[in-house]
Image (tube, rainbow, N blue to C red):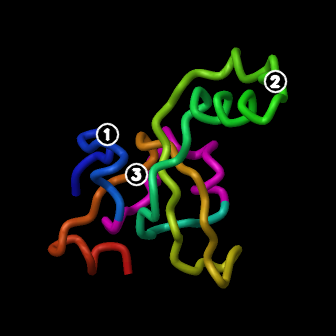
C-alpha cells in the first residue's frame, strides 16, 4: 500500500483504495461509518474551482469558503458496509486513503 498523497488526484482515478483506520482517523466520517475500500471515480473540485463556477453564474462566493483550507480530495465509490449496504460516493481527502496494490487485495476482505 502507498499513501494516496504520493499521487496527483488525477493519477488516482480508477485505482482501488483503502480508508485509513488508525487512531488519527477515529474522528473521520469514513471510519465512523465503517468504510473500508473503494475505487477513485474522479478528482474533486477545489474550493477555488467551485468559487469560479459559482461566480460565473453571478452568485458571490460564500464568505465561509475563504476560511477553509484547500485540501486535495477525490470522489470515491465505496464498497458496501453495514451502515451503507449499497455503498456510496463520497469526496475524501487524500490523507485518508491508501492506494492498494494487487498484493494488498486480500488484506481487507
Q: Locate the N terminus and report the quarter of the image it occupies.
A: bottom left
Decide which of 79, 55 is in the foreground and name it. Answer: 55
Q: Locate the C terminus and report the quarter of the image it occupies.
A: bottom left
Q: Are marks 2 and 1 in contact (CB under 8 Å)?
A: no
Task: Give the percent coordinates (x, y) of residue 106.
Answer: 27, 80
Residue at 32 percent across and 47 percent down: it is: 4
84 shown above or below 44:
below
Decide which of 26, 75 is in the foreground and name it. Answer: 75
Task: Give the percent coordinates (x, y) of residue 21.
Answer: 46, 54
**Does the magenta portion include 26?**
yes
Q: What is the number of the mark on residue 62?
A: 2
**Res 47 quadrant in image:** top right
The magenta-colored residue range is: 14-32
66 shown above or below 100:
above
**Res 35 quadrant in image:** bottom right
Q: What's the distance in space between the residues labelled 1 and 3, CA to CA?
A: 8 Å
Lower position in the chain sequence, tag 2 or tag 1: 1
Judge left or right: residue 64 versus residue 22.
right
Task: Give the percent coordinates (x, y) of residue 31.
Answer: 58, 56
Q: Is mark 1 on a helix, strand or loop?
A: helix
Q: What is the number of the mark on residue 5?
A: 1
**Res 12 quadrant in image:** bottom left
Q: What's the distance in space between the residues labelled 3 and 2, CA to CA?
A: 29 Å
Q: Residues within 10 Å of mark 3 (few under 14, many from 20)?
A: many
68 shown above or below 97:
above
Task: Give the percent coordinates (x, y) of residue 37.
Answer: 44, 69
Q: Do the residues labelled 1 and 3 touch (CB within 8 Å)?
A: no
Q: What is the number of the mark on residue 97?
A: 3
Q: What element carries label 2?
A: loop
Lower position in the chain sequence, tag 3 or tag 2: 2
Amino acid at each position: 500500500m502507498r499513501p494516496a498523497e504520493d499521487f496527483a488526484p488525477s493519477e488516482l482515478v480508477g485505482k482501488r483504495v483503502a480508508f485509513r483506520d488508525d487512531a488519527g482517523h477515529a474522528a473521520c466520517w469514513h471510519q465512523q461509518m465503517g468504510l473500508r475500500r473503494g475505487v477513485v471515480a474522479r478528482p474533486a473540485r477545489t474550493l477555488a474551482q467551485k468559487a469560479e463556477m459559482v461566480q460565473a453564474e453571478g452568485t458571490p462566493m460564500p464568505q465561509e469558503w475563504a476560511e477553509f483550507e484547500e485540501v486535495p480530495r477525490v470522489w470515491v465509490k465505496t464498497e458496501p458496509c453495514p451502515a451503507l449496504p449499497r455503498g456510496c460516493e463520497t469526496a475524501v481527502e487524500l490523507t485518508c486513503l491508501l492506494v492498494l496494490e494487487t498484493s494488498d487485495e486480500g488484506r481487507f476482505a
